[in-house]
Structure formats: C-alpha cells, structure tokens
Amino acid sequence: MRHRIVAERLPDGTLKEWHMVRGDEEQVMCGRGLPEGTEELPDDAWGTDRARPFCHTCGALYLREVP
C-alpha cells in the first residue's frame, strides 16, 4: 500500500506536525481531515528530520502497516 506524508499548518502558516495518509484516502490516519493544498513528502521520509514533528497516532498506525 502506498502512503504519503502531509503537513498540518497552523492558521499563521507555521508547521504544527506531519501526518500519514493511506493511498488516496480523504483523511489522515489519525482520523483528522486531509489538509488541502499543503506540502507532501513520500513515506520514506518518515523518521527523518524532514518529517518532524510527526503525529504520534499516525506514526504508530503506520508502523503496524509496513514491514
């Protein structure tokens, strides 16, 4: 399954945290709505400095889905 990482931004544009999305789903793995028009990273950026801070719930679910 293909995953992707999307940014959640605060109203002032500051990065709040990164979230994981399964395939082409319309919400992030923790259940929040998918932010529109935000930057994305490939799932292999998970665990790197590029994708920090990361949503704890999305990260835990992602770890259970990938080998």
Image (cartoon, rainbow, N blue to C red):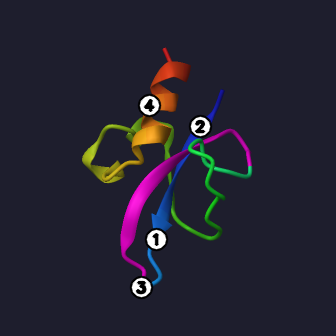
Instruction: Name the image quarter holding residue 10.
Output: bottom left
- Which residue ends up furthest to the left in the rendered image? 49
User: Which residue bears the numbered disc 2?
Assistant: 3
Q: Which amino acid, mark 4?
A: Ala
Of helix, strand and loop, which one carries label 4? helix
User: Which residue is located at x 43 percent, y 36 percent?
Assistant: 59
Range of residues picked out in magenta: 13-25
Looking at marks 4 and 3 on the same chain, the residue that comes earlier in the sequence is marked by 3
Callout 4 environment at 10 Å: few (<14), some (14 to 19), or many (20+)?
few
- Which residue ends up furthest to the bottom in the rendered image? 12
User: Which residue is located at x 44 percent, y 31 percent?
Assistant: 60
Q: Position of residue 52 (x, y in %)?
A: 31, 51
User: Which residue bears the numbered disc 4?
Assistant: 60
Q: Is residue 11 above or below residue 20?
A: below
Front one among 3 and 34: 34
Where the N terminus falls, by quadrant? top right
Callout 1 environment at 10 Å: few (<14), some (14 to 19), or many (20+)?
some
How far apart marks 2 and 3 lie (CA) works out to: 27 Å
User: Which residue bears the numbered disc 1?
Assistant: 9
Q: Which amino acid, mark 3?
A: Asp
Q: Are dots 1 and 4 in contact, CB under 8 Å?
A: no
Callout 2 environment at 10 Å: few (<14), some (14 to 19), or many (20+)?
some
Q: Position of residue 51 (x, y in %)?
A: 35, 50
Instruction: Please say whether residue 58 is one of the residues in the magenta stretch.
Output: no
Q: Is residue 39 above or below residue 49?
A: below
Q: Which mark is residue 12?
A: 3
